[in-house]
Image (spheres, rainbow, N blue to C red):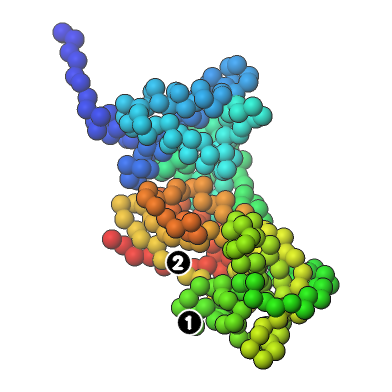
Amino acid sequence: MPLSLHALSTSEVLADVTASLAILGSSASVRRALIAAHLRAACEGEGTRNGQGVFTGRLTDMIEGDLGGLLGSAEARPLAKQVLEALEKAGDLWRSPGGYWHSTPARAVSLPGGLSFLLGVIPHGGFVAAGAFRYATGRLNQTVVHGFDDWLGRTEPIGAWMAKALKKYRPGLQPAGISADHLEIYAPDQASRQFRSRWINPQELELSGVALRLCRAQAKPTSLYDRPYYLGEFERTGNELSLRRAVAVEHEHARRFRFAYDEALGASRTLEFKHADDMVQVTLARDLPVEEGRVLALGWQHEGVSPPSVYRMVFPVQAVPFVAHALGRLGISLKGATS
C-alpha cells in the first residue's frame, strides 16, 4: 500500500488534540489547557531527569517553539507566563529559588459533593481539562484528597471572625480628636440604600448606632494601593464629623472586615454572572481577602481594559461551584444569566 500524507489544518490539529486530552470550553480555555499540559509534562520529564527543575525561560521557549504554530507565536509566550502564575498559585507546580519549576505529587482538591480539581502528576484519564486545570467527579485512585476550604485557607464564618477581630482591636483604640475630612468611611448599609459606592465621604455619613466603622485615608495624598486602614469611632459636632478614637488595622484584616460589615449591616453583595459557551463571566471588586482570592487562579481576566478597581474574570463552568463556595464564605451570592 503506498504511503500517503495528509496535511492537517490548524483547526483540525486543535480538534484532535482537544479530543485526545478531553479539553472542554472556549478557544481561550483550550489554549490554556494545552499550555498547562505541556508545562506539567516538561516539569515532570525534563525537570525530574535533571533533578534541578526547568528554568522559566526554558519553559516559555518550549511553549513558543512547540505550540506557537497552533496558538500564534505572539500569544504563546505571554500566555505561558499567565498559566505558570496560575499553576503556581494553585500549587499545581512549584518554583524553587532561581526560577526553576518542579512537578508536584498528585492531589485532588474537593468540595463536599465530590467535585474536584486536580493538582500535580495525574495519569491521563478520568478527568476533563478546562482552562489551566483538570476536573473530576468521584475519587481517583492513589490520589491524596484535600478539602477545598483547607486549600483556600480555613477561616471561621465571617460573623464569628468579626466578633473575635473586634474584641482584639477594641482595646487598642487611642484618642484621635481630629476632623474626619481626610478619611473615607466604609458604609455598605447606606450605599445599598442609595445605589452608590460603599466608601463614602465623612460629610455623608449617618451616625446610625454603629459603634465602630472601618475607614481609610483618602487616595490623595496617600498611595492608592498602600493606604492605612483604621477602625474608628465618630461623632458629629454641628456640621463637622470628627474621628474620636481609632486603631490601625492590618491590611488583610481590612479586606475581611469589609465583608463582615456587609453581612452585619444587611448589605451582603450579589454578583451577576453571564453564562455563554461553557464559560462564565463575572465582574468583582479587587478587595477579596487572600484566602478567598486564591480561587481566581481557576479562571483568567477577560481580554480588554478593565477599571483598576475590578476584575473582569472568565471561568470554565466546571470552576463555578468552587467560585460560588469561596465567595459564599464572604456572604457573596451569585446569580446568573445565559446568553
Q: Classify residue 102 as left or right of residue 137.
A: right
Work out which residue is located at the far top of the displayed protein and give it: 2
Q: Classify residue 173 as left or right of residue 40.
A: right
Q: Classify residue 302 as left or right of residue 310.
A: left
Q: Nearer the viewer, mark 1 or mark 2?
A: 1
Please name the residue that numbered disc 1 is placed on: 194
x and y, in percent, of residue 250 in the image: 72, 60
Query: What residue do we see at 48% from left, 59% from top?
Result: 310
Query: What residue do we see at 36% from left, 39% from top?
Result: 30
x and y, in percent, of residue 260 in the image: 63, 70
Q: For label 2, count other residues whose C-alpha is less than 10 Å away and answer few (under 14), some (14-19) or many (20+).
A: few
x and y, in percent, of residue 14 in the image: 29, 32
Please name the residue that numbered disc 2 is placed on: 271
Query: What residue do we see at 37% from left, 48% from top?
Result: 303
- Above or below residue 306? Residue 59 is above
x and y, in percent, of residue 330 in the image: 58, 65
